[in-house]
């Protein structure tokens, strides 16, 4: 059995280990927590996030489910209705569509339609995102479907410490939370960090992080694009401009204050998001900022998103449709030089 | 592996009895072809020439060959991730290189695997996610069991147009837990549609064994709930698969509706090539040895020799059976098989990458 927590304190850990630690720590802390998903027990998960979890907590709390996303979410909802906290793994976040009804109609609305009698503590998490050659059904960022379904919180971390801290918060939240894990970051060496344990690791939901301070333009983003924006900020620095990069971390609820405060300083906004443009979350941020921060803006706010296409398989095609450091840099320059 | 005799399979008139010795030998050649395709791709992948996940059909080839062998060109199929050889095996009996054959060419299939523009889907989606309307192969997504409703729709439309096509859908046993599996077969049963659902029961769904996927001894009994026949085939025996599938096909063509054919087999390797190392840990060694002990190539050879359709010397000319992908070499396969695949691979290597701009195309068809 692989150890649940890789490495000793003081060592740097990757994004995947961070999530693994959060889940294991919460299962140890909360005897009413259950984990369920496809191949999460015997195998330890397709990516190994739940490696060792079943051996430690037993097959009744760590359940290998049939390939039935609808039944997974729906039974998790019932367990939560009856006092449990449930972590649901989607093997890939793309497959969440097969459980759509149980999420948006059964689970998301429960608190609302019972006038607050019922709340559903559930985290639905899974590997998401493109840039890895996963093609149409292993590359999606489909968070906008759920942002448009009231009752669901949505989280997407970009660093190991945020992944751990936000996962703990999500697992302690009384509401259903969708947790988008960026699979291309799971084992990325360059972003490894030391992690705190237990409550010291907590990162609250609904609070953005300023990933880099700057004065000339604000780049607002989340997930893998945070790293693209940081690279774009390096490019902009070479051109003599300083970019502020905001990682929103939580889409619902959105920390508008942090973005507005940044715009007061930079007066320019570019939102970056790898989901398709139309009705994507980038559009939501643009809409809110054009209404709430209009007077601070000196240039039309812009967005860099995926084209309105699926994610194709072969590399040149995939890179063509997704946001890139170049596209971000170029758009930021246009906004600055408006 | 236990094989239950189906009530309408009477020993005197099995579909196989109408096969000529030549056709039975062709079945063996096709088993070699499916196997060689698989081991060749494993080798190419190990050499770093391919991207994406390889879901091996090693040890399960009799299901593909046996179920496709008796189809007409006008019939439809719906293969999934583990069924890459099905794309070129379809309508193979019309001649491997016949341009009018209603199945994919080896060139097209290889270009797809290599991610090149010569792929029928121009490499927009990976590996088994291809198809062809004109070749009557339904294009799958990743969503397991997701194409069965489309299969039902295709033959419903065909029947309206006066056709007699059947459709074979291929599914792993684990995928049957999807709600859409039930929804589609229920509809097909209500309308007596010629939908034949082949279950490739290889005992594992990724890292999960069958007893955690469904609670039946024989999955085929699920058919009782729909009021349709459920047949069981020995998935290592191409002739048994042929018999059972052809019985289902005849039943369907006669207007009697769908069937489920459960083919019992065993997954030789990991779920995909990325899973080989872990699979070696989560699957007991003796279970794997037992599951791989009846190589479909060896099983077919024994029958051909027993029937007098092949001499022992001929049977021993090529020895691909009971060998792993790393153990076989080209001399273990008939020359025509190796040559055929070489053509496909050469074509794929020469085929260009699609242009980057294609990523933005074909979201909508232009309105004329
Ligand atoms: C809706 C959906 N959920 C999960 C997956 C991930 N997945 C791909 S193959 C597989 C196992 C399939 O097992 P089985 O149906 O038995 O087919 P086999 O791979 O054994 O041939 C899983 C869980 C998926 N592709 N689609
Ligand atoms: Mg299986």
Image (cartoon, coloured by chain):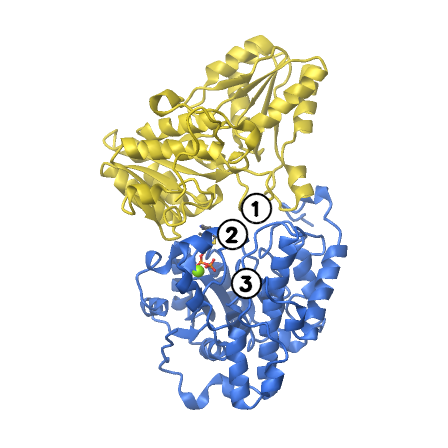
Structural crowding at the residue carrying mark 1, measured as other residues with C-alpha within 10 Å and reported as few (<14), some (14–19) or many (≥20) = many
Name the residue: 34% across, 25% down.
Answer: A198
Chain letter for the residue marked with disc 3 in the picture: B
Residue B139 drawn at (x, y percent): 57, 58
Q: Which residue is mark 3?
A: B83
Looking at this view, name the residue that lies furthest to the front: A8
Chain letter for the residue marked with disc 2 in the picture: B
Q: Is residue A330 left or right of residue A158?
A: right
Q: Nearer the viewer, residue B225 or B279?
A: B279
Between the residue at mark 1 and the residue at mark 2, the CA separation in whole angstroms equals 8 Å
Chain letter for the residue marked with disc 1 in the picture: A
Circles 1, 2 touching at the beta carbon (< 8 Å): yes
**Can residue B201 be seen in the rendering of this structure?**
no
Quadrant for ligand 2? bottom left
Q: Which chain is blue?
A: B
Q: Earlier in the sequence, mark 3 or mark 2?
A: 3
Between the residue at mark 3 and the residue at mark 2, the CA separation in whole angstroms equals 13 Å
Q: Which residue is mark 2?
A: B142
Mark 2 and ligand 1: say if the CB distance to the nearest ligand atom is below 8 Å: yes
Q: Colour of chain A?
A: yellow
């Amino acid at each position: 059995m692989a150890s649940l927590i890789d490495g000793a304190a003081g060592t740097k850990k990757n994004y995947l280990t961070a999530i693994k630690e959060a889940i294991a720590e919460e299962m140890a802390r909360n005897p009413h927590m259950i984990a369920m998903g496809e191949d999460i027990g015997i195998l330890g998960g397709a990516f190994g996030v739940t490696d060792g979890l079943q051996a430690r907590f037993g097959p009744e709390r760590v359940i290998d489910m049939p390939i039935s996303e609808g039944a997974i979410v729906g039974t998790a909802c019932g367990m939560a209705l009856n006092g449990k906290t449930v972590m649901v793994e989607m093997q890939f976040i793309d497959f969440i569509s097969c459980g759509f009804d149980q999420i948006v109609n059964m689970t998301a609305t429960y608190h609302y339609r019972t006038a607050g009698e019922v709340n559903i503590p559930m985290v639905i998490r899974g590997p998401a995102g493109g840039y890895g050659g996963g093609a149409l059904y292993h590359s999606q960022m489909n968070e906008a479907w759920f942002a448009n379904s009231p009752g669901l919180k949505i989280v997407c971390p970009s660093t190991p410490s945020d992944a751990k801290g936000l996962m703990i918060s999500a697992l302690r939240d009384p509401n259903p939370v969708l947790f988008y894990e960026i699979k291309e970051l799971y084992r990325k060496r360059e972003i490894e960090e030391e992690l705190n344990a237990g409550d010291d690791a907590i990162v609250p939901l609904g609070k953005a992080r300023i990933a880099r301070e700057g004065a000339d333009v604000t780049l607002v983003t989340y997930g893998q694009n945070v790293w693209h924006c940081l690279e774009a900020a390096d490019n902009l620095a070479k051109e003599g401009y300083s970019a502020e990069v905001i990682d929103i971390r939580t889409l619902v609820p959105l920390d508008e204050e942090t973005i507005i405060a940044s715009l007061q300083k930079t007066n320019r906004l570019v939102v970056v998001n790898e989901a398709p443009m139309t009705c994507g979350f980038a559009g939501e941020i643009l809409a809110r900022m054009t209404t709430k921060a209009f007077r601070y803006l000196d240039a039309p706010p812009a967005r860099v998103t995926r084209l309105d296409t699926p994610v194709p398989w072969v590399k040149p095609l995939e890179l063509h449709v997704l946001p890139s450091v170049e596209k971000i840099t170029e758009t930021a320059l246009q906004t600055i030089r408006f | 592996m236990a094989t239950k005799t189906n009530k309408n399979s009477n020993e005197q008139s099995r579909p196989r009895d109408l096969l000529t010795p030549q056709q039975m030998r062709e079945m063996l050649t096709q088993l070699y072809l499916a196997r060689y395709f698989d081991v060749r791709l494993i080798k190419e992948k190990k050499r770093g020439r391919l991207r994406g996940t390889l879901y091996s059909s090693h040890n399960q080839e009799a299901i593909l060959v046996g179920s496709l062998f008796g189809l007409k060109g006008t019939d439809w199929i719906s293969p999934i991730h583990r069924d890459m050889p099905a794309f070129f095996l379809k309508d193979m009996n019309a001649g491997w290189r016949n341009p009018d054959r209603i199945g994919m060419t080896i060139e097209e299939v290889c270009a797809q695997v290599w991610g090149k523009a010569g792929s029928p889907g121009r490499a927009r989606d990976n590996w088994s996610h291809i198809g062809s309307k004109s070749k009557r192969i339904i294009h799958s997504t990743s969503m397991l069991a997701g194409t069965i409703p489309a299969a039902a729709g295709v033959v419903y439309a065909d029947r309206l147009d006066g056709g007699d096509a059947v459709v074979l859908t291929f599914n792993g046993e684990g995928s049957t837990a999807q709600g859409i599996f039930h929804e589609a077969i229920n509809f097909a049963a209500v309308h007596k549609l010629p939908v034949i659902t082949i279950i490739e029961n290889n005992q594992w769904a990724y890292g999960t064994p069958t007893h955690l996927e469904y609670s039946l001894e024989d999955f085929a009994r699920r058919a009782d709930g729909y009021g349709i026949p459920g047949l069981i085939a020995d998935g290592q025996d191409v002739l048994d698969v042929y018999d059972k599938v052809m019985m289902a096909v005849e039943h369907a063509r006669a207007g009697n509706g769908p069937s489920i054919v459960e083919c019992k087999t065993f997954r030789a390797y990991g779920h995909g090539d990325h899973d080989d190392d872990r699979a070696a840990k989560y699957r007991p060694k003796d279970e794997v040895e037992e599951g791989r002990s009846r190589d479909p190539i060896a099983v077919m050879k024994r029958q051909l020799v027993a029937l007098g359709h092949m001499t022992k010397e001929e049977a021993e000319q090529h020895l691909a059976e009971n060998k792993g992908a790393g153990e076989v070499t080209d001399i273990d396969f008939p020359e025509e098989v190796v040559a055929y695949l070489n053509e496909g691979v050469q074509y794929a290597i020469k085929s260009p990458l699609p242009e980057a701009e294609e990523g933005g195309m074909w979201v909508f068809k232009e309105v004329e």
